[in-house]
Amino acid sequence: MSLLALAGVTAGYGAFTALWDVALRVERGEAVAVVGPNGSGKTTLLRVISGILPVRSGTLTFDGVPLTGRPAHEVVAHGIAHVPEGRRLFPNLTVADNLKMGAYLPSARARYRETLERVFGLFPVLAERKLQRAGSLSGGEQQMLALGRALMSHPRLILLDEPSMGLAPVMVLRLFDLIRRVREEGYTILVVEQNVRQVLKLVDRAYLLEVGRIKMEGRAAELAEQDFVRKAYVGL
Amino acid sequence: MIDPIFLAEAAVNGILLGGILALLALGLNLIFGVIDIVWIAYVDLVMLCMYLVYFLVQVYGWPVWAGGLASLAFGALLGVAVHLLIISPILGSAPVNQLLATGGLLFFLQSFATFLWTTDHRSVRLSLPSYEVAGIFVPLTRVIPFAISILALIALYVFLTRTFVGTAIRAVAQDREAMSLMGANPQWIYVVTSAVGGLMAGLAGTLLIFQYSVHPFFGGQFGPLTFMICVLGGLGNMVGAFVASFIMSEIISLAGVVWSTEMGYVIAFVVFIVMIFARPGGILARRG
């Protein structure tokens, strides 16, 4: 059984339909990317999975548990951590308090100290800046904090929305290294990215989303060879 | 010329009054900062709590501490009730409607209190000694409420900065959706915030009934002042509201000695209007 399975998912905002009949699965321990041009529905897809946006039709199953129609705060409790587009840190809280909020769930609260040490081990810069306001961090540090905050909840699946957005090229490479390390810790990742070339080096499989529909799916290495990459770029 | 000792006494009284104003202002400001709605009827909830303490202590002979605890519980319940019955159904509607709804609550509470208890002024008198310190008279009936206010504000600070729920309250104020991604139900955080705000109203009611008499229009006495302090400090800015409480109480107290209490309020409102133009974001707002 897949860890995450979407079947026939249609969703949107008001009269606008952003996702049409999407089927997608993520296996345990896998890293999967969803790539596609701007406005193809990638962010909407993650928002549907984490319960921020309700599905209109279709089903969403996580580890065999139906999550269709569950609100966001309940979805997290099942083990899905969403690092949203634009990071959405709490800018006026300290780095430490942002991480503390990542461990808000009762199950995570009990292991708060120990998890904090692990996150600090993974991102030492966060330990150095723990008393600084999150809003005062650089873009790269903010993305690390957003990732660290997601790890604080002990997720079984991490949703990453455009982690490289707004970062300098050299920082993008460092960030992908860090995501690779998070992967090696055994986390399952579903990542949405415009930086197709980089993300395909990171993941096992990828989906191509175009105008709200899944157009292609396959092993990352094979897809990188095809005109698939070019196609996604052209969409920019 | 006024004897400096009177000015010194007025300054001390200003500080003592500021403590209670801070309690009112921070209660109102906490709710505004998190839920983004001004409870126009906040001080009218305080008024209800004052009546409760009056009846329990003065009429039924409860000990003061028991009346105070009852008032805290009642205040918290009122806070939750106001949120669930009035605020929650209109959360998504236009700000002016939200203002009208809490304003309607104000008229309802005033009329209801008049209907039940008439417009009589009622108070609980405690006979506590006054002490003379360096020629200034400081009555314990004002020092003790001040000390309790400050302790309560420290407790609020610790709650908001050290606990998971308190930090979540501040986080929801910044990004409600992101906090739901952390596993917190924003609706629940709102209820907790309203309960804490109500708790503070309950405490303020307990402290006020020993210094002021309660009547159905008590809210008119402190309500505008409390709101003004919140705006002066920057709506939602807790530290700003704390500082503004003491600025306002000092102006009222000092001008009250130099001229008259009415003049004190006039000057306080003039300062307020000037500050609104000079620093519209509040006295502690960051520039730019």
Image: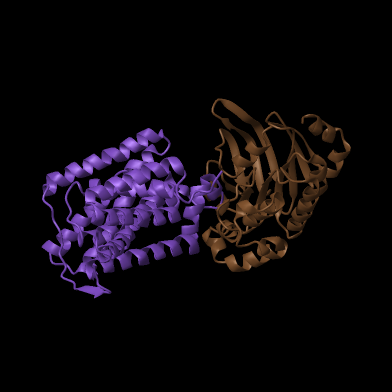
Chain colours: A brown, B purple
* Residue lying farthest to the right in this orientation: A225
Residue B92 appears in the figure: yes
When asked about the image quadrant of residue B130, the answer is: bottom left
Looking at the image, which residue is at 21% across and 49% down?
B218
User: In the rendering, at what x and y percent does residue A79 appear?
Assistant: 60, 54
Q: Is residue B44 left or right of residue A32?
A: left
Q: Looking at the image, which residue is at 56% across and 31% down?
A: A13
Residue A37 x/y as whole percent: 74, 32
Instruction: Give x and y (percent) for residue B27.
Output: 36, 54
**Vertical placement of B164 versus B117: above or below?**
below
- Residue nearer the viewer, B274 or A121: B274
Taking the spot 64% from the left edge, 32% from the top edge, the residue there is: A19
Q: On the picture, is A142 further left or further right than A100?
A: right
Above/below status of B253 relative to A210: below
Q: Locate the C terminus of chain B and report the quarter of the image it occupies.
A: top right
Q: In which quarter of the image is residue B57?
A: bottom left
What residue appears at the point 59 percent right and 26 percent down from the top-left corner?
A: A16
| Quarter of the image where one finds residue A17 | top right
* A137 and B51: which is toward the camera: A137
Judge by depth and name the residue closer to the eye, B270 or B95: B270
Compared across the picture, whether B93 is left or right of B117 comes to right
| Residue B198 visible in the displayed image | no
